[in-house]
C-alpha cells in the first residue's frame, strides 16, 4: 500500500482525498485494511483469538 500524505487546514478538508486514495487501492487492499481493523478491535476488546471464527450451532430435533 502506498503512503500518501496531504496537509491542509481543517477548514479546507474534504472527503475527496480519502475517496481517491481508497479507490486507487483496489478491492484487495480495502478488504485487507478492513480486516486489520477487525483484528485490532478484537485485541483491544480483549476477546479470545478464536472470536473471529464462524460460530456453528448444531441442534438435534427428534420426533416423540
Image (spheres, rainbow, N blue to C red):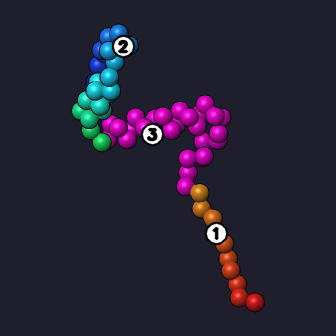
Q: Which residue lies furthest to the bottom in this view?
A: 64
At which x and y percent is residue 44? 61, 31
- Mark 2–mark 1 distance (CA, rounded to whole Å): 55 Å
Q: Is residue 48 magenta?
A: yes
Relative side of 29 to 40, left or right: left
Q: In which quarter of the image is residue 15?
A: top left
At which x and y percent is residue 6? 30, 14
Q: Where does the magenta region start and end?
A: 28-54
Query: Looking at the image, is 43 positioned above or below residue 11?
Result: below
Which secondary structure lies at badge 1? loop
**Would residue 3 be visible to someone looking at this image?**
no
Q: Residue furthest right?
A: 64
Q: Quadrant of residue 26?
A: top left
**Would residue 57 be visible to someone looking at this image?**
yes
Q: Quadrant of residue 35?
A: top left
Determine which of the numbered discs, if any, sits on residue 35 in the image.
Answer: 3
Relative side of 24 to 15, left or right: left
- Residue at 36% across / 13% down in the picture? 11
- Mark 3–mark 1 distance (CA, rounded to whole Å): 28 Å
Which secondary structure lies at badge 2? helix
* Nearest-to-viewer mark from 3 and 2: 2
Residue bearing the label numbered 2: 11
Determine which of the numbered discs, if any, sits on residue 58 in the image.
Answer: 1
Circle 2 residues within 10 Å: few <14, some 14–19, many ≥20? few
**Could you tell me if the residues under marks 2 and 1 are in contact, i.e. CB atoms within 8 Å?**
no
- Residue at 71% across / 88% down in the picture? 63
Amino acid at each position: 500500500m502506498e503512503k500518501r500524505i496531504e496537509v491542509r487546514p481543517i477548514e479546507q478538508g474534504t472527503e475527496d482525498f480519502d475517496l481517491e486514495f481508497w479507490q486507487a487501492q483496489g478491492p484487495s487492499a480495502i478488504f485487507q485494511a478492513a480486516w486489520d481493523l477487525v483484528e485490532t478491535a478484537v485485541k483491544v476488546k480483549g476477546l479470545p483469538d478464536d472470536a473471529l471464527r464462524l460460530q456453528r450451532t448444531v441442534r438435534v430435533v427428534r420426533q416423540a
